[in-house]
Image (tube, grey):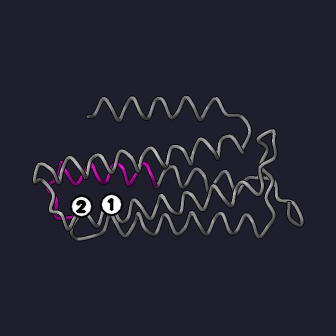
Amino acid sequence: MRNFFLGLIVLIGLSTSACSDKGKQLAASTDRIAGYVGVGLIIVDQQTSTGQMSAETGVAIVTALRQVTTLNGQLVTEAKKYVDADGNLAVTGDGQQNLLNILASSNGIINTLVNDPRVLNLSEPKRNEIIAVAANLSATIASIGELIKTTKTIKGGK
């Protein structure tokens, strides 16, 4: 499992570094979020099917991950308004704030998840798997936030 995560991180790093335009970087990062959510769902499935996690805890984690997925979809939809055909990203002031608000909501969900007593009461190795997914999600969300904050702001809308 550790090799899987390392391979995933290297692959994601390479795909992101190959993107030079902010629009393409944003797309790669939203794909990364989807990938981490997928990994989290696999972990929950494995832990619940082997009895290492209660169904109640599994449902709480899956619910949080699905909320992150929904917000990721909203981020993609909102961002499409500001990406041109060449992959360049230029946001309006309101657009930038909308994107940052979506990211803040995702971060809130992740923070709530990692502080959920059901997650905290998992055995250390199982808890660490969930926390690792959450940490990767948080790091990706933070990098998207920095990308958006450093993106050229334009007047008006597209």
Magenta span: predominant SS is helix
Q: Mark 1 Cα within 10 Å, few/some/many (few <14, many 20+)?
A: some
Which quadrant is the C terminus positioned in?
bottom right
Callout 2 secondary element: helix
In the displayed structure image, the side of residue 126 where residue 151 appears, left or right? right
Q: Marks 2 and 1, Cα distance to the nearest angstrom?
A: 6 Å
Percent position of residue 65, x then y:
39, 59
Q: Mark 2 Cα within 10 Å, few/some/many (few <14, many 20+)?
A: many
Amino acid type, callout 1: Val
Q: Which mark is residue 58?
A: 2
Residue at image coords 50%, 34%: 12
In the displayed structure image, the side of residue 2 where residue 156 appears, left or right? right
Asked where in the image residue 120 lies, by quadrant, the reply is bottom left
Residue at image coords 33%, 31%: 4
Q: Which mark is residue 134?
A: none
Percent position of residue 45, x then y:
24, 50
Q: Are marks 2 and 1 in contact (CB under 8 Å)?
A: yes
The residue that disc 1 covers is 62
Amino acid type, callout 2: Gly
